[in-house]
Image (cartoon, helix red, strand yellow):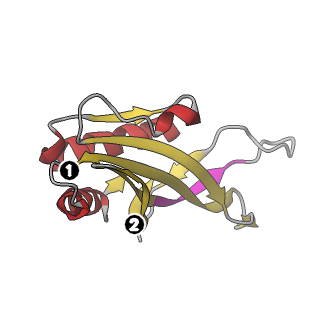
């Protein structure tokens, strides 16, 4: 589920954000290395943050929960004139590429944009998104909850 969502976000960004020349990757690894500037900039890194589940509500059988999968897109940019506003069109392109995008696990909604760091002519921003959907897990005949989680397409 998480990997599929992340891959679909990367695919959508590659199709819609031309300014980075395909320099868009899923990121996982040592958190200390996350903010290390890539060799080629501008660049985007898609990072899984967390998933929140609503309180369980039994709607007959099966159990259904709202899900909120959080992903961040880290935007790396180097300004040739030390003007941070040169990165704004790239941030806008990321926002526009993912706002309302429908994944197999829910619809993508923007959460926020934040400057993470600025040193000399290098800027790092984070654009946060939420993928909202529903999960459904069945109950086996013996009353034990199954471990498999099936996702219901969110019609929102």
What's the magenta region? 130-138
Mark 2 or mark 1: whose residue is earlier in sequence = 1
> Which residue is denoted by mark 2 in the rendering?
110
The picture quadrant where one finds residue 150 is top right
Image position of 111 with respect to 124: above or below: below
Q: Is residue 44 left or right of residue 31?
A: left
Image position of 33 with respect to 144: above or below: above
Residue positioned 65% across, 61% down in the render: 65
**Magenta residue check for 118:** no
The picture quadrant where one finds residue 22 is top left
Q: Secondary structure at mark 2?
A: strand
Residue 134 x, y percent position in the rendering: 55, 59
Residue positioned 15% across, 54% down in the render: 81
Q: CA distance from mark 2 to mark 1?
A: 25 Å
Q: Is residue 1 visible?
A: no
| Mark 2 or 1: the one toward you | 1
**Magenta residue check for 131:** yes
> Which residue is denoted by mark 1 in the rendering?
79
The picture quadrant where one finds residue 43 is top left
Residue positioned 17% across, 50% down in the render: 16
């Amino acid at each position: 589920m998480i990997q599929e969502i992340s891959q679909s976000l990367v695919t959508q960004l590659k199709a819609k954000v031309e300014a980075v020349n395909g320099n868009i990757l899923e990121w996982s690894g040592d958190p200390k290395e996350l903010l290390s500037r890539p060799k080629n900039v501008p660049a985007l890194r898609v990072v899984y943050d967390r998933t929140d589940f609503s309180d369980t509500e039994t709607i007959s059988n099966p159990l259904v929960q709202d899900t909120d999968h959080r992903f961040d897109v880290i935007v790396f940019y180097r300004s040739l004139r030390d003007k941070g506003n040169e990165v704004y069109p790239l941030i806008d392109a990321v926002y526009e590429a993912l706002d309302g995008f429908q994944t197999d696990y829910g619809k993508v909604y923007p959460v926020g944009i934040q400057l993470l760091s600025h040193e000399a002519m290098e800027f790092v921003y984070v654009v946060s998104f939420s993928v909202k959907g529903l999960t459904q897990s069945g109950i086996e005949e013996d009353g034990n909850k199954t471990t498999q989680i099936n996702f219901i397409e969110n019609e929102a």
